[in-house]
Amino acid sequence: MFNLRVYGILVNEQQQVLVSDEFIRGNYYTKFPGGGLEFGEGTRECLKREFMEEMQLEVEVGDHIYTTDYFQMSAFNPSHQIISIYYFAHPLEAISVPLRIKPFDFDEVQLNIYAEKQETETFRFISWDEFSPDAVTLPIDKIVAKIIKEKG
């Protein structure tokens, strides 16, 4: 079974990279915003939908950065192979969701969501100087972080 994921790299005017801090099934992950492709949807449409669902943010999908070119088993379902596609994302409006300074700084509402759904997320920017592959958790995200850091 294949699981197709689409993620956006959003770098703001201050050269900061947007990440999502997530608490999923008892584990903490720092990753790029995005999610799963739905049937009948194109990859760019998926990324626009994910930003709207997660951040209430309209984005323009920019250049393609990377598509997984090796086998990656899903961290959540060992019978699934993950294929991830990454694009640059450009906000078309101001970000309205709360942005955190510290990793995994969930508020009471987010913790209540976790109690119900077993997952929650919050967002923050990482300065370009502090951003590296070590700033993200997932193996494919680490590859993409290295690519965008090298391209500078």
Image (cartoon, rainbow, N blue to C red):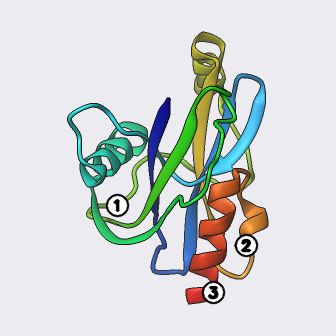
On the image, numbered disc 2 is attached to which residue? 132
- The nearer-to-camera label among 1 and 3 is 3
Indicate left or right for 47 with 125 as reference. Answer: left
- Secondary element at image label 2: loop
What is the quadrant of residue 24 in the picture? Answer: top right
Q: Residue 1: x, y in percent?
A: 50, 29
On the image, numbered disc 1 is attached to which residue? 94
Indicate left or right for 55 with 26 as reference. Answer: left
Badge 2 amino acid:
Ser
Indicate left or right for 54 with 149 as reference. Answer: left
Above or below: residue 78 compared with residue 32: above
- Secondary element at image label 3: helix
Q: Identify the mark nearer the N-term, 1 or 3.
A: 1
- Secondary element at image label 1: loop
The residue that appears at 23% across and 40% down in the rendered structure is 41
Quarter the C terminus occupies = bottom right
What is the quadrant of residue 106 in the picture? Answer: top right
Badge 3 amino acid:
Glu
Q: Residue 42: x, y in percent?
A: 24, 47
Look at the numbered discs 3 and 2 and tell me whether their residues touch, using CB distance below 8 Å. Answer: no
On the image, numbered disc 3 is attached to which residue? 150
Q: Is residue 152 visible?
A: no
Badge 1 amino acid:
Ala
Above or below: residue 121 compared with residue 108: below
The residue that appears at 64% across and 47% down in the rendered structure is 72
Which label was assigned to residue 108? none
